[in-house]
Image (cartoon, coloured by chain):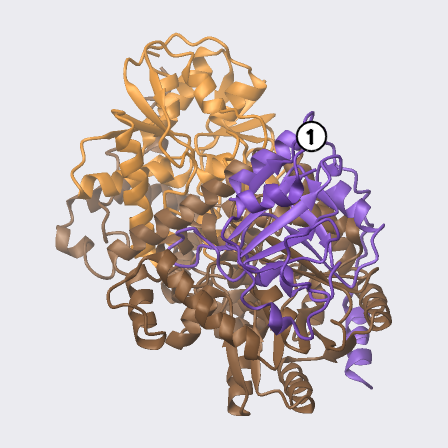
Chain colours: A brown, B orange, C purple
């Protein structure tokens, strides 16, 4: 991102953070809700086998068909098989980070299925052949003019009209046709309720509901960590989710899918894809509590300035750093530096995921997998050498002021990251230790 | 009450006046305070960079050095936040100690200036020096409370009062672009308050912001909060 | 072993510590005036709230709100201005082009302006495809918050149910709020 984009991105996401603060402060029991949400998640995760079985039994009793997928490939194969059995050629999807994780769209397209994303942001990105840069506001990195140009090209909108209302209406028209002609619909799930066997999907646009209201087939992709024990747990989560995500009191639609539509089929694919393994990783299992609200991204000072594309994992920001490391530490280790350890993410997280502590912990593991930053390692080793030798340290303290007289070009060059945009602080003529020894402190 | 003074490495070398001010404050308050020699660094820079193992000998050294003291105080929130959970918890940041343990309610100093308080991340979110902006809890600020004891000081807070300044230890050199960008934004928010000084409990953040300010030739000054509290001593 | 068995076995193998389910009874006072709170929040999310006055005719009230709605879908017996009965369409597609849907909500939620609508028509499409939506709600049926709402949900047997709070919306282009994404472009809740 250039400077202007950075400033806009930063300011816009900060505005979302402020909206979140505004709503959170209106709920006196907010912190208690966060505590409860975290405890409910920890309980559910630590009894996940039981809840998955209960959910499956109830969902099947409701008339849904439940599938289990160990990994992305199995998930994709199951979805394709369901579509093929129904001779479905066009699939209309609502937003699902899980299907991004599984790379479902390219797989289905390679197998002759037309896939239509229906969330406006996701549709924009699909038309651009681009990936989301935020999990809740997927196209937040784009300017309206870019969307205007894209729609001009793809949806034949007026030239140079980039008014958001105009463009949204154009997408509404275009996607309505897709909803009405789709053979199948697909949604993700915000929650899967064990004791009722229902799926809960939260949207503002109504796209999940439009999709499922017309097509005769509804496929739900749901990560196994999305289980909620019962309605009473939903009471806690639904109070937190939209307020944390976008600063709304609720999403416009909180839809509860319990039975298939009359004469239609509902398939639920429960996906593991590494989650059961994460469960066994006590230092990082809390990442499974995440309800994908994106609040940690909006508050993250680094994410706000770097944007989602600066991260190599498909989920960016604090939660993405951690999920990427859980997926493949070697592949995604480069994201771990994108954190100043300010801990703001920990405190906005509605389910109290210890995001910053986990990033800290991943950093400790980088050296052992050969991914430690070389300069940081050299400095750390050097400093350790210095700080474990008090006499050497004291001698260096005495000598340090000499650095103040080193010519500028030797200090401010590209090897010195600090010198980029910052002056070095001058060393004091006498260190505190020297002053103390000379009796200049105690008078 | 036997109190040991810990002066973090970079304060020792770059900002010794912060150590001097800390000493003067405690001396004025009648607290017996000593500076054990042979102290070095708390180990945080290595740990945050991913080498906590390398910090362990320093923590051990720290523990031994201050074993005989009832309390340890240090004018650096970040270092204290690192040391506290890794030792027996008797280390306090100076403001925290003045506010919570000594419950100081009178100081003789005058500082007739406008100051903008820099709420450092670890001070706020780990040491609880003020209420983090994210949480729905009663608002408070121990630093602001203490500053009200000083005559003439006018206290401001920047917009985004506890957003990170971008220092982050070795983050500042591993991610220099975003670190500098955060510093520039933070500095602009401090300057926008109209303050003459930026003050706070972490010299590390102040050093970073000062570095940005000097490069941009901004006239704003930086002063550790302990120096204001010790004004006139 | 099936994938199901493998996943369950992996989960069982990996659970090391178990945690209890907390008692979910959050503190929090109810609203002194739930109707007022419901109305204010609904308006803040771009919904319209109208109180049907004593002796006022419901159909006339709706007509006055949406004078130009040519196609009106409703299966409610008290509604006489409907032109389509969503119970009688063969496919939901026939509801395309509906200008106004009139549906019944079971209860409202004061804290966030949600109205609970368990599917009470043959085609739920009417809730979403109508350009504008009118929700009839008994004003004595407003609960404080989502905890109370979910307690009440148990009393409904539904295959599909939805909490709706206001018209559909998006901010996916530059975070500029646009009301009317895929669902209703406007929602009026009539408190009866």
Q: In the rendering, at what x and y percent does residue A303 appear?
A: 42, 55
Name the residue: 22% across, 61% down: A414
Q: Secondary structure at mark 1?
A: loop
- Residue B155, quarter of picture: top left
Name the residue: 64% across, 91% down: A87
Q: Taking the image as drawn, is residue A312 in sight?
A: no
Name the residue: 82% across, 63% down: A51
Quadrant containing the C terminus of chain A is top left
In the rendered structure, the answer to whether residue B164 lies left or right of residue A76 reads: left
Q: In the rendering, at what x and y percent does residue C121 appear?
A: 73, 61
Residue in the foreground of this view, choosing between C135 and B104: C135
Q: In the rendering, at what x and y percent does residue A331 appear?
A: 49, 75
> Label 1 is found on which chain of the structure?
C
Name above or below for residue C39 compared with residue A79: above
Q: Taking the image as drawn, is residue B158 in sight?
A: yes
In the rendered structure, the answer to whether residue C13 lies left or right of residue C178 reads: right
Name the residue: 53% across, 23% down: B97
Residue in the foreground of this view, choosing between A299 and A250: A250
Q: In the rendering, at what x and y percent does residue B59 appear?
A: 55, 45
Residue under label 1: C54
Mark 1 surroundings: few (<14), some (14-19) or many (≥20) residues within 10 A: few
Quadrant containing the N terminus of chain A is bottom left
């Amino acid at each position: 991102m250039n400077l202007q984009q950075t400033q806009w991105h930063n300011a816009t996401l900060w505005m979302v953070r402020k909206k979140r603060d505004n709503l959170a402060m209106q709920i006196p029991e907010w912190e208690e809700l966060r505590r409860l949400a975290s405890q409910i998640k920890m309980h559910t995760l630590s009894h996940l086998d039981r809840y998955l079985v209960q959910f499956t039994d109830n969902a099947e009793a409701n008339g849904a068909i439940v599938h289990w997928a160990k990994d992305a490939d199995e998930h994709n194969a199951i979805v394709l098989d369901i579509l093929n059995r129904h001779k479905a050629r066009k699939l209309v999807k609502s937003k699902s980070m899980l299907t991004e994780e599984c790379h479902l769209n390219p797989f289905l397209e390679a197998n002759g299925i037309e896939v239509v994303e229906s969330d406006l942001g996701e549709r924009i990105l699909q038309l651009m052949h681009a990936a989301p840069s935020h999990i809740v506001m997927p196209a937040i990195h784009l300017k309206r003019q870019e969307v205007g140009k894209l729609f001009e090209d793809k949806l034949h909108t007026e030239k140079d009209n980039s008014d958001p209302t105009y463009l949204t209406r154009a997408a509404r028209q275009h996607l309505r046709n897709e909803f009405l002609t789709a053979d199948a619909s697909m949604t993700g799930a915000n929650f899967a309720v064990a004791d009722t066997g229902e799926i809960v999907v939260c949207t503002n646009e109504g796209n999940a509901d439009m999709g499922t209201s017309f097509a005769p087939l509804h496929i739900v992709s749901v990560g196994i960590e999305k289980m909620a024990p019962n309605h009473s747990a939903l009471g806690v989560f639904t109070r937190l989710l939209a307020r944390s995500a976008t600063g709304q009191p609720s999403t416009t639609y909180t839809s509860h899918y319990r039975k298939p539509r009359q004469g239609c089929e509902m398939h639920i694919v429960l996906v593991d894809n590494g989650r059961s393994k994460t469960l066994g990783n006590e230092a990082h299992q809390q990442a499974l509590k995440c309800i994908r609200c994106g609040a940690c991204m909006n508050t993250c000072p680094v994410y706000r300035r770097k944007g989602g594309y600066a991260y190599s994992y498909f989920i960016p920001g604090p939660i993405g750093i951690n999920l990427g490391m859980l997926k493949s530490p070697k592949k995604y280790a480069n994201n771990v530096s994108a954190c100043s350890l300010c801990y703001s993410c920990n405190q906005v997280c509605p389910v109290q995921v210890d995001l910053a502590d986990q990033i800290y912990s991943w950093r400790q593991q980088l050296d052992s997998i050969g991914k430690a930053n070389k300069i940081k390692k050299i400095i750390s080793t050097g400093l350790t050498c210095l700080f474990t030798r008090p006499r050497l340290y004291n001698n260096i303290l005495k000598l340090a002021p000499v650095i103040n007289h080193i010519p500028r070009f030797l200090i401010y060059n590209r090897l010195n990251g600090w010198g980029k945009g910052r002056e070095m602080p001058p060393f004091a003529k006498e260190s505190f230790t020297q002053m103390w020894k000379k009796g200049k402190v105690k008078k | 009450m036997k109190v040991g003074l810990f002066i973090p490495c970079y304060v020792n070398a770059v900002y010794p006046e912060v150590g001097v001010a800390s000493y003067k404050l405690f001396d004025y308050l009648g607290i017996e305070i000593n500076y054990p020699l042979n102290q070095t660094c708390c180990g945080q820079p290595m740990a945050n960079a991913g080498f906590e193992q390398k910090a362990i000998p320093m923590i051990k050294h720290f523990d031994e050095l201050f074993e005989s003291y009832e309390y340890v105080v240090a004018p650096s929130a970040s270092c204290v936040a690192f040391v506290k959970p890794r030792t027996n918890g008797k280390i306090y940041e100076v403001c925290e100690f003045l506010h919570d343990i000594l419950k100081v309610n009178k100081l003789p100093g005058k500082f007739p200036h406008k100051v903008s308080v820099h709420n450092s991340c670890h001070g706020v979110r780990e040491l609880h020096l003020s209420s983090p902006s994210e949480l729905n809890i009663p608002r408070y600020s121990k630093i602001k409370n203490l500053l009200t004891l000083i005559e003439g000081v006018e206290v401001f807070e920047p917009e985004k009062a506890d957003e990170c300044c971008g220092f982050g230890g070795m983050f500042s050199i591993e991610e220099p672009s975003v670190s500098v960008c955060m510093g520039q934004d933070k500095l602009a928010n401090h300057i926008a308050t109209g303050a003459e000084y930026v003050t706070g409990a972490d010299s590390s953040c102040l050093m970073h912001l000062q570095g940005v300010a000097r490069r941009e030739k901004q006239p704003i000054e930086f002063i550790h909060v302990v120096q204001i509290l010790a004004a006139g001593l | 072993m099936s994938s199901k068995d493998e996943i369950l076995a992996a989960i069982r193998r990996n659970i090391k510590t178990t945690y209890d389910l907390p008692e979910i009874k959050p503190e929090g006072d109810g609203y002194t005036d739930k109707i007022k709170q419901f109305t204010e929040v609904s308006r803040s999310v771009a919904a319209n709230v109208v109180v049907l006055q004593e002796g006022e005719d419901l159909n006339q009230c709706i007509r006055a709100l949406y004078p130009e709605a040519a196609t009106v879908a409703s299966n409610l017996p008290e509604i006489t201005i409907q032109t389509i009965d969503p119970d009688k369409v063969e496919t939901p597609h026939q509801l395309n082009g509906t200008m106004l849907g009139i549906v019944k909500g079971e209860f409202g939620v004061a804290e966030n302006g949600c109205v609970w609508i368990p599917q009470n028509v043959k085609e739920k499409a009417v809730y979403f495809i109508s350009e504008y939506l009118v929700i009839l709600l008994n004003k004595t049926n407003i609960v404080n918050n989502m905890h109370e709402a979910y307690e009440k949900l148990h009393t409904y047997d539904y295959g599909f149910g939805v909490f709706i709070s206001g018209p559909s919306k998006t901010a996916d282009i530059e975070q500029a709020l646009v009301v009317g994404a895929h669902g209703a472009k406007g929602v009026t809740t009539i408190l009866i």
